[in-house]
Amino acid sequence: MFHVKPIFTSMFGSCHPVGLNLLRKLASAATAPNDRGASRDGGWLRCHVKQLKLARNAILLPLATSLVSGAVFATTPEKVAFPSLEESIPTKLDGYLFKPTNRIKSADGAPAIVLAHGCSGMIDNKGKIRAGIAHWATRFTEKGFVVLAVDSFNPRGHKEVCTQSSRPILESRERPRDAYGALKYLSEQSFVDKNRVFLMGFSNGATGTLYAIEANGKLHKLANEAKIAFRAAMAFYPGCNNPNKNRLKPAIPLAIFIGADDDWTPAQPCRELIDLNKARGLEVAFFDYAGAYHGFDVPDSTVRIRKDVLMSNRPGLADGVHVGGNDDARRAAEKDVDIYLRPFLASQATGDVTTTLAPKP
């Protein structure tokens, strides 16, 4: 069995009625707890943890439809090129753009997700997009999102960096620049709602996600100057052992999803990072999954031990690290991601999930 421990806080000063109304609708026939006694110093996410747990169980039926309804997955992504966001000379990056095949009804465009791959890179040995990225791209596109999966390695002459003792591409340097380059590209597309673009990173890309949304980081300030911003971020099994993690203060809502048994990027430092920012009053969430290792969300992936990876962050693990999928944990994380994203997609006027995709005539 998987085990999930959500921790939520908010930058808002009172319980958010939109989130409450939305979760009540998701729970449909179930009776939602009364919110009159909720604390006014924690924000709607913390105020309505009970509703979130209720919605998590009640969401099985709504999951049959889209987060943003009416989308059909376009099976073949379009390869696009765009520059990284740099202070000096940008790098020309490759991206794989997935779009729903149905027309976009909203004049504001569809919500979008930037996917940042792990240290194994975007492309596998068969020349295909790696299974984990492909899975999430497919899932989000079927739910009505535009998805841009960014290749940070091949344009720089590398297929992977897991096995390199001196990594030429850093999660604290190139990865955030690439994320914002992708955000800028999406923000310029007429079919994308630039106010609802999310960042989702995995492993090395997840650590890059933490750096990208650092409130005091140069890249975040550079993005502000470019008038672009991610709506929220999700980091799957990032490395939180950074000695400077006390300075990692997210400028936007952040959720971390990680295997409780991860021995490559352990869960405890990430929990501490979330607790730290919870104490700061920021909107953060933490989910861990019992029995799950690094890469638990990759479908059809057998757990194995890797001894060929860079372990400078955990030098005591001479016997290698566990990597591989866990179907129960993956399915739980999928539900948690859906629940986490729904309030950010809600119409402020009605509390309903905004329908941005219409069926073909």
Image (spheres, helix red, strand yellow):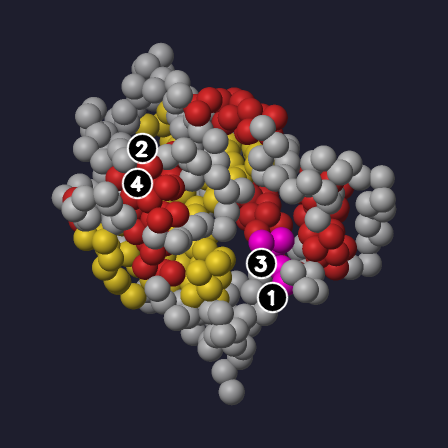
- In percent of width and height, residue 275 lies at 58, 26
Separation of marks 1 and 3 at Cα, in angstroms: 6 Å
Q: Which residue is mark 4?
A: 175
Tag 3 near tag 2, CB within 8 Å: no
Who comes first in sequence, dot 3 or dot 2?
2
Separation of marks 4 and 3 at Cα, in angstroms: 26 Å
Separation of marks 3 and 2 at Cα, in angstroms: 29 Å
Residue at 39% from the left image edge and 47% from the top image edge: 224
Q: Residues within 10 Å of mark 1 (few under 14, many from 20)?
A: some
Who comes first in sequence, dot 4 or dot 1?
4
Tag 2 near tag 1, CB within 8 Å: no
Magenta stretch in the rendered image: 342-347
Residue at 45% from the left image edge and 55% from the top image edge: 197
Q: Amino acid at mark 4?
A: Arg
Q: Amino acid at mark 2?
A: Ser
Tag 1 near tag 3, CB within 8 Å: yes
Q: Which residue is mark 1?
A: 354
Q: Which residue is mark 2?
A: 172
Quadrant housing residue 167: top left
Quadrant housing residue 242: top left
In this view, the residue farthest toward the top is 316
Q: Residues within 10 Å of mark 3 (few under 14, many from 20)?
A: some
Query: 169 or 36: nearer the eye?
Result: 36
- In percent of width and height, residue 22 lies at 71, 57
Element type where label 3 sits in the image: helix
Tag 4 near tag 2, CB within 8 Å: yes
Element type where label 4 sits in the image: helix
* Quadrant occupied by the N terminus: top right
Q: Amino acid at mark 1?
A: Thr
